[in-house]
């Protein structure tokens, strides 16, 4: 028989389908011995049987299904009709009898709080907080039954309907239970978070408290006191002026009273109560295994817990101890790809990079270099490097390492040590120094080009004619040593270009007062694989502009038949040969290319169509090559000017000439290591996808892309026949998890305690009302903002400014058409900055929320000299 009523002591977390999230938590805490006022739940069986008495709900649900969350007026109208209809229904006698019996047993003379408890409420991933109604200080049989119906009807308030629609919950599948709980008449009430709700610090308990019932605080009628506790100490205390309080009336109901002047300024909780409450909160957190949002009250110096739910707004933490304190840097921000990654992409990165260096959280990768940051000299170098990668990251890390608590932590257990870095770097630095000082630069270029081609061929050969588990073992092996191979064989040729740039910058600023000549010297650097890719794409676009039939075909082409379809249109065969040559060289690239699961250009060639057509519409034939040639002349002119500035100083002139030569020869190689890495990943992906197709044929996978939701080790186990568990269930679970992670905004920097550290940029010499970022490419440009979140189908017209969350080499085709670039992520040496300087267009990066602050179509001015954006109209 379906129970209509369950007492708290009969309920635990497994009761959620019958008593909803709130009821399940109250029962769970009651059974665990926490101080919860007694009561009972009217189950979802009662709600369903009540609804069955209606002959109209099916048509109402059909109307709700057709509504969009944005149709607020329609939502209001249907919600009002449903609520009125439910209030007019009679409660069936069996339900009424069960409720009255429970109420009598609990105490018919008592006062009660009556709250709704939905089955999609107070869950780990969806709180639904405040979506239904709460009624306080209810007394008497008729009042109880009347408010039970009010609660049932409140499942269809405007806010509850819209919340379900926005979060994809079926209105028919969300059921309502009602919590009937003994009222505590409190001196003080409030809300306690067992992790800081603002910055996410799991070690901090944050408490809001005010006098009387907590409804004044929740409804925003009063500013509560704020107390923060960390490591058994009160670390912050803000006593607010509390003008009002809501109190229970002896005859039932509540009243709002104005407090006396003395009470308004008084601390709502004593220090002793604060500490006891914080300790109780952490005990509840340990019981649930996750940070909690807890409602509490204090009556006659006794603490009571009236609700606890998970905090759903915190960014997830990696599975590491909170102490000693560690600093976790977003790998995605450094790689210009902040989107969530699927398990295969995360697994591949764990194979490429040292496993103790990378930590996964929220579908992203974070780097732990805390050990290095504990060394004073190395710390300066890391901060300087971070300044080039992302200014916001640099500011945050600098703030953390300056804290006494960080400096006093024992670094011995940290993930990476200075000695291990020194051991790895010594031979690389030695070779690089020899090249910088006196190496044959043409031979260096030839060596890098040779190695790049041979490395790709060696990866292909190792995977060729291998199948099944043996092939995946080779993939793991290749990924396992690709980083070491690049460091040993490519970085010695990249490093001299970076060092020469830094040394030239000092000379140029000292001689000229600014970096203008260095910016010119940076233009049209040869041997930059990403710039070369942009030029070759421009050549393809020039070819395409002369082939109108091919243009028409591309506008409706399909990836699966892309190449065969080209052969059926005039000029298509010649274009196919040229396009295939481009793809053979660059096809492993794409937006978000560091994630192996991102769709490569060789998999989806139509991704390049928008860039090709943008180029045709915004450039004259051959203009891209002409601009490159002009940039080269500017660089030569800058070279002469710099050498003229040191004329007369023989040694200075000789060193400067060498630095310029090194920079112009090797500076462009700064993109080479990423190109080789992505090439190796591309070849490995081909092998993985071929094995995935085999698993589809054998019935293990529904589709090849399902392999994205497996780790490499799991794929290997499947191929070896030793995988245990329900594969389809695992994939479905991870798909759902990935969707949740996609909605999270990853922090640049967080600590092992979960604290998200944000330090805003300084506003020195910046006009009021402007949007501030980091200047990375000089110049000032005005134009129309084109906000682009993904580049695959994006078009830029002449005179438009690219505004993007981030850019990597997969975005390069759009740079050809932009007059300036703005990104939310980046630093001086990240991809977008480097390409913008080479193209000679202004760029400002590290602009928090640029894609929302700047609207598509705004006329804006980008100041790449000082690092700010003005919205003109």
Image (cartoon, rainbow, N blue to C red):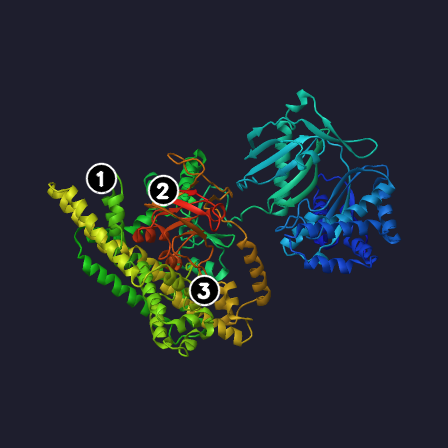
Q: Residue at x 52, y 72 (%)?
A: 721
State the residue position of label 3: 599
Q: Is residue 499 above or below residue 442?
A: above
Q: How far separated are the C-alphas under marks 3 and 1?
A: 46 Å
State the residue position of label 2: 383
- For marks 3 and 1 on the same chain, the one whose residue lies earlier in the sequence: 1
Residue lying farthest top?
262
Q: Is residue 144 left or right of residue 675?
A: right
Q: How far separated are the C-alphas under marks 3 and 2?
A: 34 Å
Asked if one can make out residue 485 in the rendered structure from this viewpoint, the answer is: no
Q: Which mark is residue 799?
A: none
Q: Is residue 788 left or right of residue 457?
A: right
Residue lying farthest bottom?
568
Across and down, in percent, residue 743 comes to 55, 53
- For marks 3 and 2 on the same chain, the one whose residue lies earlier in the sequence: 2
The 10 Å Cα crowd at callout 2, few under 14, some 14 to 19, many 20 or more, is some
Q: Residue at x 38, y 40 (%)?
A: 374
Q: Is residue 531 above or below residue 755?
A: below
State the residue position of label 1: 512
Q: Label 1 near label 2: C-beta < 8 Å?
A: no
Secondary structure under tag 3 reads loop
Q: How far separated are the C-alphas under marks 2 and 1?
A: 27 Å
Q: Label 1 near label 3: C-beta < 8 Å?
A: no
Across and down, in percent, residue 464 comes to 37, 74
Q: Nearer the viewer, mark 3 or mark 2?
A: 3
- For marks 2 and 1 on the same chain, the one whose residue lies earlier in the sequence: 2
| Camera-nearest residue between 394 and 838 | 838
Asked if one can make out residue 31 in the rendered structure from this viewpoint, the answer is: yes
Across and down, in percent, residue 759 comes to 44, 38
């Amino acid at each position: 028989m379906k129970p209509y009523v369950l007492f708290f002591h009969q309920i635990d977390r497994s009761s959620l389908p019958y008593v909803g999230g709130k009821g399940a938590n109250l029962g769970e805490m009651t059974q665990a011995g926490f101080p919860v006022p007694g009561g009972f739940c009217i189950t979802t069986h009662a709600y369903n049987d009540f609804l069955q008495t209606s002959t109209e709900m099916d048509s109402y649900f059909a109307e709700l299904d057709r509504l969009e969350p944005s149709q607020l007026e329609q939502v209001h109208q249907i919600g009002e009709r449903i609520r009125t209809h439910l209030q007019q229904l009679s409660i069936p006698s069996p339900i009424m009898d069960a409720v009255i019996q429970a109420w009598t047993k609990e105490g018919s003379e008592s006062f009660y709080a009556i709250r709704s408890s939905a089955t999609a409420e107070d869950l780990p991933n969806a709180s639904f907080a405040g979506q239904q109604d709460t009624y306080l200080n209810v007394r008497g049989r008729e009042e109880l039954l009347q408010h039970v119906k009010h609660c049932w009807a409140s499942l269809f308030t405007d806010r509850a309907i819209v919340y379900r629609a926005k979060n994809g919950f079926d209105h028919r599948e969300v059921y309502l239970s009602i919590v009937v709980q003994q009222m505590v008449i409190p001196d003080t009430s409030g809300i306690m978070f067992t992790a800081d709700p603002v910055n996410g610090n799991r070690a901090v308990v944050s408490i809001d408290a005010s006098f009387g019932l907590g409804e004044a605080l929740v409804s925003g009628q009063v500013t509560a006191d704020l107390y923060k506790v960390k490591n058994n100490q009160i670390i912050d205390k803000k006593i607010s002026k509390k003008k009002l309080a809501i109190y229970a009336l002896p005859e039932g109901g509540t009243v709002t009273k104005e407090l006396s002047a003395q009470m308004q300024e008084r601390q709502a909780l004593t220090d002793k109560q604060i500490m006891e409450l914080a300790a109780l909160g952490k005990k509840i957190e340990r019981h649930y295994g996750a940070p909690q949002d807890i409602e509490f009250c204090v009556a006659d110096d006794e603490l009571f817990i009236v609700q606890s739910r998970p905090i759903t707004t915190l960014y997830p933490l990696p599975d590491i101890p909170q102490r000693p304190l560690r600093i976790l840097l977003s790998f995605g921000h450094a790689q210009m790809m902040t989107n969530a990654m699927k398990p295969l992409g995360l697994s591949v990165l764990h194979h490429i990079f040292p496993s103790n260096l990378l930590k996964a959280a929220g579908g992203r990768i974070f780097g732990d270099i805390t050990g290095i940051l504990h060394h004073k000299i190395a710390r300066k170098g890391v901060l300087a490097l971070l300044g080039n990668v992302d200014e916001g990251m640099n500011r945050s890390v600098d703030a953390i390492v300056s804290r006494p608590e960080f400096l006093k932590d024992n670094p011995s257990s940290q993930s990476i040590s200075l000695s291990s870095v020194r051991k790895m770097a010594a031979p690389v630095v030695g070779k690089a120094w020899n090249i910088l000082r006196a190496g044959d630069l043409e031979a260096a270029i030839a060596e890098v080009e040779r190695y790049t081609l041979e490395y790709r061929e060696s990866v292909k050969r190792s995977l060729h004619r291998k199948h099944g588990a043996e092939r995946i073992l080779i993939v793991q092996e290749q990924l396992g040593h690709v980083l070491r191979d690049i460091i040993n064989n490519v970085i010695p040729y990249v490093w001299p270009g970076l060092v020469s740039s830094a040394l030239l910058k000092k000379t140029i600023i000292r001689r000229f007062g600014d970096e203008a000549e260095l910016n010119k010297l940076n233009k049209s650097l040869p041997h930059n694989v990403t710039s070369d890719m942009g030029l070759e794409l421009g050549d393809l676009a020039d070819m395409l502009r002369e082939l109108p039939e091919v243009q028409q075909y591309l506008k409706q082409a399909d990836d699966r038949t892309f190449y065969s379809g080209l052969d059926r249109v005039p000029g298509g065969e010649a274009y196919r040969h040229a396009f295939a040559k481009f793809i053979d060289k660059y096809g492993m690239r794409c937006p978000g290319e560091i994630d192996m699961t991102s769709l490569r250009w060789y998999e989806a060639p139509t991704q390049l169509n928008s860039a090709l057509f943008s180029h045709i519409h915004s450039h004259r034939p051959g203009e891209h090559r002409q601009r490159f040639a002009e940039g080269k002349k500017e660089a030569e002119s800058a070279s002469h000017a710099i050498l003229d500035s040191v004329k007369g100083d023989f040694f200075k002139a000789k060193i400067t000439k060498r630095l310029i030569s090194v920079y112009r020869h090797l500076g462009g190689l700064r993109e080479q290591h990423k190109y080789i890495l992505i090439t190796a990943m591309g070849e490995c992906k081909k092998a993985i996808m071929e094995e995935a197709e085999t698993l589809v044929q054998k019935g293990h996978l529904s589709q090849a892309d399902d392999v994205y939701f497996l780790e490499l080790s799991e794929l290997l186990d499947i191929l070896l026949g030793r995988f245990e568990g329900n594969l389809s269930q695992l994939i479905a679970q991870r798909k759902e998890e990935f969707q949740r992670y996609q909605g999270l905004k990853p922090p640049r920097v967080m600590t092992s305690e979960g604290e998200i550290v944000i330090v805003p940029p300084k506003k020195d010499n910046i006009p009021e009302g402007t949007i501030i970022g980091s200047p990375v490419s000089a110049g000032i440009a005005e134009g129309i903002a084109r906000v682009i979140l993904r580049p695959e189908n994006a078009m830029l017209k002449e005179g438009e400014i690219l505004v993007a969350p981030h850019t990597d080499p997969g975005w390069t085709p759009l740079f050809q058409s932009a007059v300036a670039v703005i990104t939310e992520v980046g630093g001086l040496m990240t991809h977008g900055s480097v390409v913008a300087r080479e193209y000679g267009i202004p760029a400002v990066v590290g602009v928090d929320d640029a894609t929302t602050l700047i609207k598509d179509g705004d006329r804006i001015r980008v100041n790449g000299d000082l690092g700010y954006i003005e919205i003109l109209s």
